[in-house]
Every structure is written in C-alpha cells, then in structure tokens.
Amino acid sequence: MSSELRTLYPEIEPFESGMLDVGDGHHIYWERSGTKGAKPAVFLHGGPGGGFSARHRRLFDPKLYDVILFDQRGCGKSTPNASLEANTTWDLVADIERLREMCGFDKWLVFGGSWGSTLALAYAETHPDRVSELVVRGIYTLTRAELEWYYQFGVSEMFPDKWERFLAPIPEAEQGDMMAAYRKRLVGDDRKAQLEAARAWSIWEGETITLLPEPETSGPFGQDDYAIAFARIENHYFVHAGWLEEGQLLRDAWKLADIPGTIIHGRYDMPCPARYAWALHKAWPKADFHLVEGAGHAYSEPGILDRLIRATDGFAGKK
C-alpha cells in the first residue's frame, strides 16, 4: 500500500435529482452522481437529521460509481423540514428500498458513517440480499450505554468546557436525564427556548466529533435552520433508542456473514466508543477492520478519509 493518503475526488455535480414521495406527507430529496450504469451505491448521511453535502459525492470515483445520495426524512432539502411525524429508523429503511427500486438496481454498495452506520446496519440486516458491499465508519449501535456515554456521563469528562455549554439551557433539577430535558424544549411551543436548545445540542456534537478543532466541520452546526432540524430529529431518534431492541444491531450481525465489507473507526472517536466497532468486527469477521490511530469521529479526518476512499476504490476493482 502506498504511504500517500488518498483524499476526496474532484468536485462533481449530480447528473439527475428529484423529490420522491414516500408517503406519510414526506418527500425526500435525492440526487445521482458519477456515471449512469456504473457500480451502484447509496450514501447514508449522519445525524439523524444531518443531511448530505456536495463533499459526500466525492467519496466515490465518478468514473466507476453510480451513486444515490439523499436527505433523510425531515432534513436537508426533504420536506416537511424538521418533521418528526412518521420519522423512524424503519421508515428510512423502507425509503432506501424505494430509492433502489426507483433506480432499478438489483444490489448496491451501502456506505454510511456515524448514524449512517446505524442505518446501514439496520438496512443490511433487513435486506442482506440487496447489499453488494457494506462500508461503515464511526460505528454507532445505539445502545443505552452509547447514548448515556455521549449525553449523560463520559464525553462530559473529556470536554468539560463544551459540556458546560451543553448543560446551560437545562435547569439543574432536569440534568439527570439530558435527552428528555432537551426533548421537552425541542418539541415545545416556545420558539426562543427551542432555538436555544437546538443550537446547544447541535454545537455539542459539532465540536466533539474531530480530534482537533475543525471549524469547517463544526461551523454548520451553529446555523439556526440546520440546528433546529438536526437537534429535533436526532433527539427524537435517540429518545426512542432508534426503535431498535437493546443490542439488536450486534445481535443480528450474523445476517451480514456473506456481505463483503469494511469497518473504519477512529481510535479517539468521542461520540462513538471504539469498543462497539470492535464488537462489530468480532461479529462480522468477513469485513476488513481498520482502527485508525490519531483520529476522532469525522469522515474528514485524514486517516479515516484515506481508508474510506481505499474501500470504495477497492470495491470498484481499483487498486
């Protein structure tokens, strides 16, 4: 393997885009980039509630891939914005299938990081026959321990300054259950309190996902419109534990046995402790496993990005 780190492909515009009516009043924005008829892939963004960006198109060699990217229910360009109605993990799994059928793909490579890894695992365990390969980064299996590590006690010990700002909108009497306290404000009618909570929730994540401060990554988390959709949807999913049974994604990892894949995780990933990536590696030995030293959570970390590009290149037959 060459020592030179691989990075994003050049900027590219989609060759097709549209809105898909998925029912329940939701319309999801999708776009297609790369080369029509090349290797099919779908990109699953993080959050939940994060939306995808133009940079995500560049994780795939455009000559070798035909990639679908879409904004999950309620976020990005999908409508209605920030809606929590009919917005669950299983609604999104069904939407991924609708997109695959719309494109006429028999199977596709599924790529997801952070919450995208959660959704990718839920989809692949539900429809293993539709997944040609699986690339997952920043593994999050959405167990109670993982949620409490990030929102109650754990990361708080590593970022006391940022944690103090996360606590600020919540009275001390309610700080014993931060997710519930935030939900009260994020779904409430007080717009000022909702926005204050949304910004604090969103910035907490934006500033703890990289090993070193990275304003280009954390900046959007403080923007009002982004923060409202991101915080409302993410909190909604996490309060409901993703509508998953406790430990379900690792319990059912045996369903991935015949799927080639790659697991990539930063050694110093704060939101998503590495032990869950290690557990997935043990449960799904067919997949390549890369624990990247000197890296946090974000896909933009150089060592993580290198591994992601090598994975998409490799599965398209490129050395």
Image: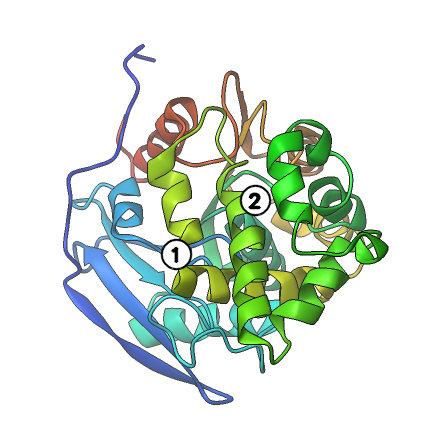
Question: Which residue has dot 1 on it?
Answer: 223
* Secondary structure beneath label 1: loop
* Secondary structure beneath label 2: helix
Residue count near mark 1 (Cα–Cα under 10 Å), binned few <14, some 14–19, many ≥20 = few
Question: Which residue has dot 2 on it?
Answer: 204
Q: Nearer the viewer, residue 215 or 41?
A: 215
Residue count near mark 2 (Cα–Cα under 10 Å), binned few <14, some 14–19, many ≥20 = many
Judged left or right of residue 27, residue 195 is right
Q: Residue at x 46, y 36 (%)?
A: 298
Give the number of callouts.
2
Image quarter of the C terminus:
top left
Residue 298 higher or lower than 97, as above or below: above
Q: Residue 52: image x %, image y %?
A: 36, 56
Q: Within the image, what quadrant is residue 45 found in?
A: bottom left
Q: Within the image, what quadrant is residue 78 found in?
A: bottom left
Amino acid of disc 1:
Gln
| Disc assigned to residue 247 | none
Q: Residue 33: image x %, image y %?
A: 21, 57
Q: Residue at x 29, y 35 (%)?
A: 317
Amino acid of disc 2:
Trp
Q: Nearer the viewer, residue 264 or 159?
A: 159
Q: Residue 303: image x %, image y %?
A: 41, 22
